[in-house]
Structure formats: C-alpha cells, structure tokens
Amino acid sequence: MKHYDTIIIGAGLAGLQCARLLGRKGLSVLLVDRKASLDTSIHTTGIFVRRTLEDFDLPEDCLGPAIRDVTLYSPSRRSMDLTSQHDEFRIGRMGRLYARYLDHCLRAGVDWLPGTRYVEHCRLKDRLVVRLDGGHFSRWVTTRYLVGADGAKSRVAGDLKLDLNREWIVGVEDVMTNIPLNGPPRLLCFLDPKIAPGYLAWIAHDGEETHVGVGGYASMFDPLRSLNQFQSSLNGIIDLSGAISLERRGGRIPVGGVLANIATTEGLLIGDAAGAVSPLTAGGLDPCMRLSTLAARVIAEYLETGDADALKVYSGELFRARFASRLWMRRLVTSVRQPALVELACAGMRLPVANWFAWHVFFGRGSFPDVEVPFAAEPLAGTR
Ligand SMILES: Cc1cc2nc3c(=O)[nH]c(=O)nc-3n(C[C@H](O)[C@H](O)[C@H](O)COP(=O)(O)OP(=O)(O)OC[C@H]3O[C@@H](n4cnc5c(N)ncnc54)[C@H](O)[C@@H]3O)c2cc1C
C-alpha cells in the first residue's frame, strides 16, 4: 500500500495551491479529484481581485484583461458607475489556470489521481488509511495527514469530525463570447431581490469573455428560470444577439463565514470546505489562495516537528473574529427582500457615506484576513 505524507482530496484552486506548495517543500503528496479532467465542470466565474493579483503570481496568460469599472444597477435599472484608478479585477481563464497549477504540482513531484473519488478513511496506528474509488477499482492508500479541499459539501470534513457548511447561496452563469463591448472592460452588478434574492445578478465582460449569471438563496428562487429572465431583460444594456455560448457554470457558495473548527491532528480543511468565502461578496478565490498557503506552512511544520501546537494558528475562530462585520452585513442583505427597499438603498448610495461603502465593497482590500504566522518569512506566492 503506497504511503504519503499528505493526501489532498479535491483539485480546485485550494487543493492545487496547497499541493504545489507542499510538493515544493519536499513532502510526498497525493492529489485526488473525482473529475477526470480539471477543465470540465468549472463552477466559478473566476474573478480575481487586486489583492490576490498583487500577492500571488498568477500566470499572466491565465488571466483576462484588467477591469477598473463597475456599474451598479437598482431593481428598476437605475445605474451608478464606480471607476477605480487601479486594475481591480481580472477574470481567470480557469481551465488553463488549473492545468498550469497541476503542471506545477507534477513538476514538484506530486502524484495525481484524476477520476477518483474519496470514499472514507480510518486510523491504523500512526497513519490514516484512505479508501479511494476510481469507478472500476477501489484502492487503499495511507497517509500521515489528510486535507479536505473537496468543496462546499465536504465529505472529508464530516469524516474528520470538523465543522460543515450550513448556509449557502447558489450561482449559475453562462460564459459567452462574441459580445460587443462598449467602453472599457466592466463588471455590471444588478441588485434585484426577485432575480437574485440575497445576492446579485452579474455581467462580467472583459472584452474577450462575458459571464452572465445570477445568484441567491436556493429556497427563494429557481436559478435557471432567473437566469433566463435576467438574460432576456438586458436589452439596451448588452447586446446578446450574436453571443456564442461557451459553457454553463454553477454551484453552491458557502456564505456562513469561515468555519470555526477546521483542523485536527489527522487533517484540515481549505477553500470552500472550510467555508473560506467572503460572506458579503461571495468571493472565494482570494481565501482559497491565502488559506491554502497558510495550510501548507502549518502542515509542513506539524509533520516535521510532530508538535500539535503548530496547528493552533490554523483556527477558524481566529478568522471568524475578523469576519464579524461581513457576517452582520450578510444578515442585513438577506433580510431586505422588498425591491422598493433595495431601490431606496441604491438611491442612498449616491450619498457620500453609502457611496464610500459601495467603493469599499467593490474596491476594498479586505477579501480575507492575512494571518500572522510564526514561521520564518516566506513569500506567499508560488512561481509561474
Ligand atoms: C457560480 C459561481 C461563481 C463564482 N464566482 C467567483 C468569482 O468570480 N470570484 C471569486 O473569488 N469566487 C467566486 N466563486 C467562489 C469560488 O469559485 C470558490 O470559493 C472556489 O472556487 C472554491 O475552490 P475550492 O478549491 O475550495 O473548491 P472547488 O473548486 O469546489 O473544488 C473542489 C474539488 O473537489 C472535488 N471533489 C469533491 N468531492 C470529492 C470527492 N469525494 N473525491 C474527490 N474529489 C472530490 C471536486 O471535483 C472539485 O474539483 C464563485 C462560485 C460560484 C458557484
């Protein structure tokens, strides 16, 4: 039976980032994903914020043109423009990015098992025995440490007796091309509790790709119906007549805040499995990069020293404290369901304080807290 220092379940952005860092540290790592190929069933729009673009060296050819302009629409489609003097967002070419990060993993010596599902694990003396199912075969591998990077509904989290996500919104979008762009690349956000209850509808258009989607609480809307309704209401805003559809994406987004209990001496959680998503903006890519980088440091330290104290900094409680205001704002957003009230709030955004708030939400730099880690200074980023 093959033995690894770490087995990582899930090769989304979180799992890939953690695997390539641990591989570079010389640990033996097995990366597993139930998907046969990482460029299928992508479920993210892939908008990276400035803070991530600055702190991590994402490969240039895996990113679309920079976006500085945001237009915010009220339910009655009154609009307000916000323009930053910085390049605030870039839409990731996620299939290509996953493939590049996987290549980094393989070069760092990580073993890769696609088309293979994590089923369960048990402890046997000083190691964990993990059962994997590859469709036509079942295999057992052993590891010193298990990482759950298996998304919002994490099976690993339950098996490790760690916390589970309990609150999420669902998002669905169409990725299209051949749509004319009038003006600079732009993010258009539509606040409309009928189409997108508890979140928003969006168009992200960088001149090459256009993502048109809706998100909200599953119990309050039918996502596909809302998406159709939204797309057919866009006359005068965007010309979809010549659009070429590339793919449809969708999935759950945990918005209850980072979970409190995300690490034990047997394993830990990263990315959506850890609830590491901004409760307000539902942005999860920056948290993926930050938390996975921290996890790699913590795991390496723990496996090297065997000292459980190394895991103490990897505490959801620490992060949650810094998310208090965003959780509070999510409660507020969820409670406002009447279009008239949202309309009023949008009108209020022209006032200086509320306008500052909108700026802060779109262009602020507080996506996910950095954590002071008591290890030797080490760059956050990986190499291209
Ligand atoms: C529609 C939508 C749009 C979004 N847009 C943005 C955005 O623009 N910007 C942003 O910052 N955030 C966005 N998010 C959130 C962001 O995409 C996620 O937070 C992030 O992608 C999570 O990455 P992850 O690696 O934790 O999980 P995932 O990407 O979900 O990866 C989990 C992986 O685990 C695998 N897996 C699951 N179970 C098993 C198992 N039992 N065995 C083996 N493998 C398994 C899955 O196949 C998957 O590949 C969006 C989310 C959605 C749903």
Image (tube, rainbow, N blue to C red):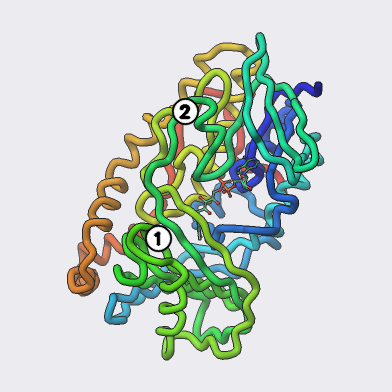
> Residue at image x 51%, y 56%?
251
Horizontal side of 133 relative to 321 (left or right) equals right
Residue 162, disc? 2
- Work out whether residue 60 or residue 232 is closer to the camera in this orientation and state it: 232
- Total marks in image: 2
Q: Whole-percent x and y of residue 85?
A: 44, 68
- Identify whether 337 is placed above or below 123: below
Q: Residue furthest top?
A: 125
> Residue at image x 50%, y 57%?
49
- Identify whether 265 is placed above or below 244: above
> Which residue corresponds to mark 1?
363
Horizontal side of 32 relative to 321 (left or right) equals right
To which quarter of the image does residue 223 belong? bottom left
Type of residue at label 1?
A: Phe
- Work out whether residue 381 or residue 291 is closer to the camera in this orientation and state it: 291
The residue carrying pointer 1 sits among few (fewer than 14), some (14 to 19) or many (20 or more) residues within 10 Å by Cα, namely many
Q: Whole-percent x and y of residue 201?
A: 40, 69
Q: Nearer the viewer, mark 1 or mark 2?
A: 2
Q: Tag 1, which secondary structure?
A: helix
In the rendered image, the quadrant that contains the N terminus is: top right
Q: Is residue 260 visible?
A: yes
> Residue at image x 62%, y 67%?
64
- Identify whether 146 is placed above or below 21: above
Q: Earlier in the sequence, mark 1 or mark 2?
A: 2
Type of residue at label 2?
A: Leu
Gap in angstroms between the C-alphas marked 1 and 2? 33 Å
The residue carrying pointer 2 sits among few (fewer than 14), some (14 to 19) or many (20 or more) residues within 10 Å by Cα, namely many
Q: Tag 2, which secondary structure?
A: loop
